[in-house]
Image: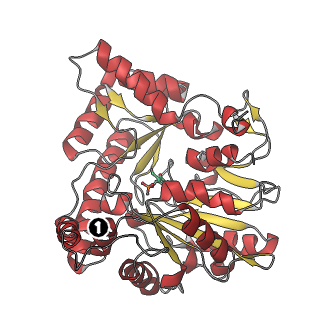
Amino acid sequence: MAKVNDNYLKLPGSYLFSTIGKKVNAFAAANPDKKIIRLGIGDVTQPLAPAIISALHSAVDEMADAATFRGYAPDLGYEFLRNAIAENDYRARGCDIGADEIFVSDGAKCDSGNIQEIFSTDNKIAVCDPVYPVYVDTNVMAGRTGTYQAETETWSDVIYMPCTAETDFAPELPGKTPDLIYLCFPNNPTGSTITRSRLQEWVDYANRVGAVIIYDAAYEAYISQEGVPHSIYECQGARTCAIELHSFSKNAGFTGVRLGYTVVPKDLKVGDVALHGLWARRHGTKYNGAPYIVQRAGEAVYSEEGKAQLQKQVAYYMNNANYILEGLKAAGYTVSGGVNAPYIWLKTPGNMTSWEFFDYLLEQANVVGTPGSGFGPSGEGYFRLTAFGSYENTVEAIDRIRNLSGC
Ligand SMILES: Cc1ncc(COP(=O)(O)O)c(C=O)c1O
């Protein structure tokens, strides 16, 4: 008789955004006359840039002609895209990463969930608290996290690194030694960043204890300040301890198009096993590549025209972020993030729990955000708003929040 993977049964409740979706749908059904503004889930709203649309059209035309038709993509992704990535995201920043160390995929969510497969289930993971839930849940599915402790909403075998106001929402080196360390900067959900010198400490630490850092740089395009690293490979020694994940979702609006990549340097070894070979094996066996059309669209992200258009798109969202940040500050909220990231992290007023504030905001202002506690226990009492809405909706949402009484 077939048996299920019991680890799936350990996952508590439904995925955060499903719970939010259900609550919002119920509210909308009961209040059909209310205009709900969604600043919750991190999906983009601006259309694809013209340079990308044009690349998509040409690639579609190529597929219509037997002479230019493409079938399965090469295992690691097309060279034209990997060369563009290596040149623009790495060499231009002084990082020593070759095109043959880049694995093109259909997004960072899959890669961040799948990468744990190449590690033993005995490995101890360390995650920031609060955290992008995918890192923890995929390790639960793999059976790496021990038992769930409902009272603390934590897993017995996971090392949590609290990121609180006291630590500037950045993690401190953990007391217990982990094998795998998940870091994400600029951070989802808190919008915090890490300086190059602080990240260097993590790289030195990982090399010292033999840990591997899984560095999620999905929001790198939003960095506006000097001294904030765009890649972990800006740190010395990162080639021997770090895997880096990238997404085209937030810098180029590919949330529905789907494209990402993962860097596994050839120098990265666990014992004498090179992780590059393991990930190549996994990629080749379980994945048949991002579509040719989409990889051509990804190439256009790095064209001069594409870069200029996308800079404007990022600036559009960051203008929203600034409106949220300043508007909430003016209303007396304690807020952070929103400078190098499209996320604003606010302290809930009047000691409300995160979910109490979610309900309050939905009912009183018809604005949807994300309860901080959904990202981990240290997120309790916090709330995330995103800058990915339209400017008009963002302004209306913040004005509604400012007009609420009693906050
Ligand atoms: C930290 C982080 N990593 C990865 C992703 C997913 O990226 P993708 O759309 O490329 O799967 C997200 C999406 O919200 C994210 O916040």
Q: Specify whether 271 is left or right of 18.
A: right
In the rendered view of the protein, which quadrant contains the C terminus?
top left
Among the 4 quarters of the image, the one containing residue 180: bottom right
Between residues 197 and 137, which one lies in front from this camera angle? Answer: 137
Q: Height in image: 208 above or below 335?
A: below
Q: What residue type is labelled 1?
A: Ile
Which element type, helix, strand or loop, lies under badge 1?
Answer: helix
With respect to residue 338, does 218 lie above or below? below
Q: Position of residue 384 (x, y in %)?
A: 45, 40
Circle 1 residues within 10 Å: few <14, some 14–19, many ≥20: some
Q: In which quarter of the image is residue 212?
A: bottom right
Return the residue nearer the eye: 104 or 48: 104
At x 19% / y 64%, what residue is drawn?
53
Q: Residue furthest top?
A: 30
Residue shown at 33%/69% (left/top)?
292
Residue holding disc 1: 293
User: Split into 4 quadrants, where in the image is the N terminus?
Assistant: top right
Q: Residue 78: horizontal and vertical position, in percent?
A: 40, 77
Q: In this view, does 316 lie above or below 197?
A: above
Residue 154 in view here:
yes
Q: Can residue 163 be seen in this view?
A: no
Residue, x 65% and y 37% (percent of image)?
Answer: 377
